């Protein structure tokens, strides 16, 4: 897991969990292209677990430190805590054990014989650990050191032979840079920040499912599919959906918008509570989504203006026709006619912001934005909405 040097502060452990979950994404990303069937699990046998052919093939312990931290040595609590976990495992023939830490192995330490990319020296590491196990007076590690000393020679040798240490791992705030390096092959030029935002958003949701055991495992192929989908969403004929937009909302969201003109317009047509808050949800999602696009420079205001004009044109045709039919037939249920106009637009609208972007909630939300007077247009649902709006605006002195 993760440690820090910040006493009882919750920030250090929280960053440790972020680092662990996002490091799992990096590790899977590095393997997916050549081992797509590989399965990843979180907090199973270890912090991060990889399974091949139905059996564990690699276990990772992640250690994250904030602030100033010393080097990792044979006396380190992190190291002995990790060894304690691994000594309890039923080790199969091919299982690899890796410690990923933000600390650094000092020059001259025998532990560097387990470091990725350096000459392996398991015997030197074993000698240093045995010496530390006998000499250390640390009460925290005492039981773990005794367990190590009590292992028979063959078991100790086997354990050390499986271990690799990846030191100087990036800290949580630098994870975005590492993600960019990992997925560079798939990221369209100039879209690095938005790609990382989208892949992190998707992975955050998947991590929760893995930790809650709602999802047993994720494969390299699952990641490849998602990376391909995100890259496709960043092409010029479509737009990506911000993962935050997909979250669940409840009726409490209505409080944020209860005094807005578009809500008043819905009340004029007597929209019942359930449909009212869902309409507000559509508006909120559409507003948040277009803010996301503008923030990441994925479209321009002029493109939104053109889309708003097409929506206005669709509304105008349906509104004029429905109101004319109402008057010819002598109907007096103007609120119901307003509901029919809203329903027909939601069902029949063909306007698209981009050729391959077809999210019905976005168009519905944009209709409510126009009912609010945004993007230089004003539409409504009640056949007499203009007169009603004049009265409202006059009342508030606008």
Image (cartoon, rainbow, N blue to C red):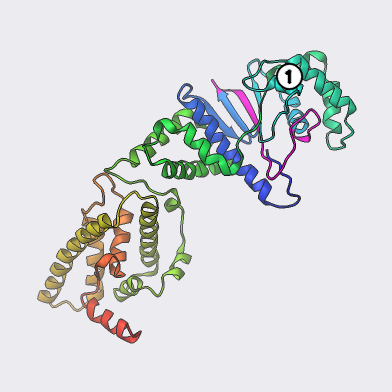
Side (left or right) of 239 relative to 218: left
Side (left or right) of 110 relative to 376: right
Binning the other alpha carbons within 10 Å of mark 1 as few (below 14), some (14 to 19) or many (20 upward) gives some
Q: Quadrant of the N terminus?
A: top right
Q: Going 41% across and 30% down the picture, which residue do you hit?
A: 185
Is residue 71 located in the magenta-colored stretch of the structure?
yes
User: Relative to 355, does residue 35 appear above or below in the rendering?
Assistant: above
Is residue 43 located in the magenta-colored stretch of the structure?
no
Is there any visible trace of residue 210 in the rendered image?
no
User: Relative to 160, does residue 251 appear above or below in the rendering?
Assistant: below
SS at mark 1?
Answer: helix
- Image coords of residue 130 (percent x, y): 84, 21
- Image coords of residue 104 (percent x, y): 69, 32
- Image coords of residue 146 (percent x, y): 86, 27
Task: Name the quadrant containing residue 172.
Answer: top right
Q: Quadrant of the C terminus?
A: bottom left
The residue singled out by tag 1 in the image is 160
Question: Count the marks: how many?
Answer: 1
Q: Going 26% across and 82% down the picture, which residue do you hit?
A: 390
141 or 75: which is nearer to us? 75
Q: Residue furthest left?
A: 328
Instruction: Magenta stretch: give its range.
Output: 52-78
Side (left or right) of 219 relative to 239: right
Is there any visible trace of residue 143 in the rendered image?
yes
Task: Name the quadrant containing residue 65.
Answer: top right
Task: Name the quadrant containing residue 361.
Answer: bottom left
Q: Going 33% across and 60% down the picture, which residue do you hit?
A: 365
171 or 79: which is nearer to us? 171
- Image coords of residue 187 (percent x, y): 40, 36
User: Relative to 27, does residue 69 appear above or below in the rendering?
Assistant: below
């Amino acid at each position: 897991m993760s440690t820090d040097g910040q006493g009882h502060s919750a920030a250090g452990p929280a960053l440790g969990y972020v680092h662990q979950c996002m490091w799992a994404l990096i590790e899977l990303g590095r393997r997916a292209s050549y081992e797509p069937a590989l399965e990843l699990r979180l907090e199973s046998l270890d912090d991060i677990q990889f399974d091949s052919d139905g059996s564990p093939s690699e276990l990772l312990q992640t250690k994250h430190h904030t602030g100033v931290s010393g080097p990792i040595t044979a006396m380190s609590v992190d190291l002995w805590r990790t060894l304690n976990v691994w000594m309890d495992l039923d080790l199969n023939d091919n299982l690899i054990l890796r410690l990923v830490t933000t600390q650094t192995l000092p020059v001259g330490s025998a532990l560097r014989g387990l470091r990725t990319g350096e000459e392996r020296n398991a015997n030197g590491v074993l000698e240093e650990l045995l010496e530390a196990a006998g000499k250390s007076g640390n009460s925290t590690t005492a039981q773990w050191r005794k367990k190590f000393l009590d292992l028979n020679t063959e078991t100790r040798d086997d354990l050390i032979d499986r271990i690799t240490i990846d030191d100087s791992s990036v800290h949580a705030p630098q994870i975005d840079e590492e993600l960019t390096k990992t997925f560079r092959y798939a990221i369209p030029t100039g879209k690095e920040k938005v790609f990382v935002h989208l892949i992190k958003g998707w992975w955050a949701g998947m991590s929760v499912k893995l930790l809650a055991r709602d999802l047993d495992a994720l494969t390299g192929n699952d990641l490849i599919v998602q990376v391909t989908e995100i890259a496709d969403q960043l092409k010029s004929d479509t737009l990506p959906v911000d993962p935050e937009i997909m979250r669940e909302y409840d009726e409490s969201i209505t409080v944020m918008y209860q005094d807005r003109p578009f809500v008043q317009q819905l009340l004029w047509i007597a929209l019942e509570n359930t449909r009212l808050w869902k309409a507000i949800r559509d508006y909120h999602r559409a507003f948040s989504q277009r803010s996301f696009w503008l923030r990441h420079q994925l479209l321009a205001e002029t493109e939104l203006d053109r889309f708003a004009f097409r929506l206005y044109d669709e509304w105008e045709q349906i509104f004029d026709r429905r109101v004319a039919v109402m008057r010819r037939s002598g109907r007096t249920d103007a609120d119901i006619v307003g509901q029919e106009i809203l329903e027909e637009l939601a069902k029949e609208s063909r306007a698209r912001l981009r050729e391959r972007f077809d999210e019905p909630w976005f168009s519905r939300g944009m209709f409510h934005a126009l009912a609010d007077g945004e993007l230089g247009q004003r539409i409504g649902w009640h056949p007499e909405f203009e007169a009603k709006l004049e009265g409202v605006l006059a009342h508030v002195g606008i």
